[in-house]
């Protein structure tokens, strides 16, 4: 995966179709009415900054990471994600900072973990609170990872996840 950083100033538009009103970690966003409107969906980590705290009628300054890679199927895959958001030059969102452990994170390749069906009961709710920033993805049965991506990971989150899984085997 090759990434480049771009800066965009504009008004966010969130795709509410996947938002259940209670909890959705990954939100989809586009920037409209800005210096560089985006056609492509931008991923937003709702755990770091709840989307409901962003006023869609206001303009913000966004730092976006755009990535591309060649998938295992031979096609080009593109991704965009929010790195930082500033409100009048005040930082209000930083995807590279772990709020749980209050430290900067590392950018690492995701690795496959235990499949989702083998995880202990309650894992997802504990993960959201105690170790949200691990580099393991837990695939559902039969899902196919077509491109290796980089993700922000917190070493303390990874350590906490490992310890929790050891104490709570399925």
Image (cartoon, grey):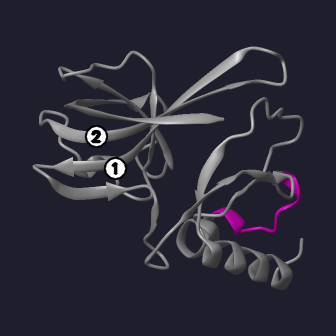
Residue at 53% x, 72% y: name it: 129
* Residue 62: numbered disc: 2
Circles 2, 1 touching at the beta carbon (< 8 Å): yes
On the picture, is 156 further left or further right than 59?
right
Quarter of image, res 123: bottom right
Residue 120 in magenta stretch: yes
Residue 88: x and y in percent read: 10, 49
Of 164 and 120, nearer the camera is: 164
- In the visual, does 124 lie left or right of 99? right
Q: Does the magenta run of residues contain 13?
A: no
Is label 1 in a helix, a strand or a loop? strand
N-terminal-most mark, 2 or 1:
2
Cα–Cα span, label 2 and label 1: 6 Å
Residue 39 picture location, percent across and down: 39, 15
- Label disc, if present, on residue 33 of the rendered structure: none
Q: Which residues are magenta?
A: 117-124
Disc 2: CA contacts within 10 A as few (<14), some (14-19) or many (>=20): many
| Residue 70 position by quadrant | top right
Residue at 77% x, 67% y: name it: 121
Residue 97 versus residue 157 in the image, above or below: above
Residue carrying label 1: 84
- For the point 33% across and 41% down, the residue is 63
């Amino acid at each position: 995966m090759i990434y480049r950083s771009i800066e965009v100033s504009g008004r966010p538009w969130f795709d509410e179709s996947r938002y259940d009103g209670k909890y959705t970690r990954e939100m989809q966003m586009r920037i409209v009415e800005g210096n560089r409107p985006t056609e492509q969906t931008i991923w937003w980590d709702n755990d770091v900054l709840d989307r409901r705290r962003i006023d869609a009628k206001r303009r913000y300054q966004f730092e976006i990471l755009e990535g591309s890679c060649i998938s295992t199927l031979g096609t080009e895959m593109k991704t965009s994600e929010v790195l930082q958001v500033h409100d009048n030059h005040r930082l209000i969102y930083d995807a590279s900072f772990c709020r749980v452990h209050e430290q900067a994170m590392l950018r690492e390749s995701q690795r496959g973990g235990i499949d989702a069906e083998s995880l202990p009961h309650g894992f997802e709710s504990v993960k959201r609170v105690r170790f949200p920033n691990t580099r393991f993805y837990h695939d559902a049965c039969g899902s196919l990872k077509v491109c290796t991506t980089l993700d922000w990971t917190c070493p303390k989150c990874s350590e906490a996840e490992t310890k929790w899984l050891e104490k709570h085997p399925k």
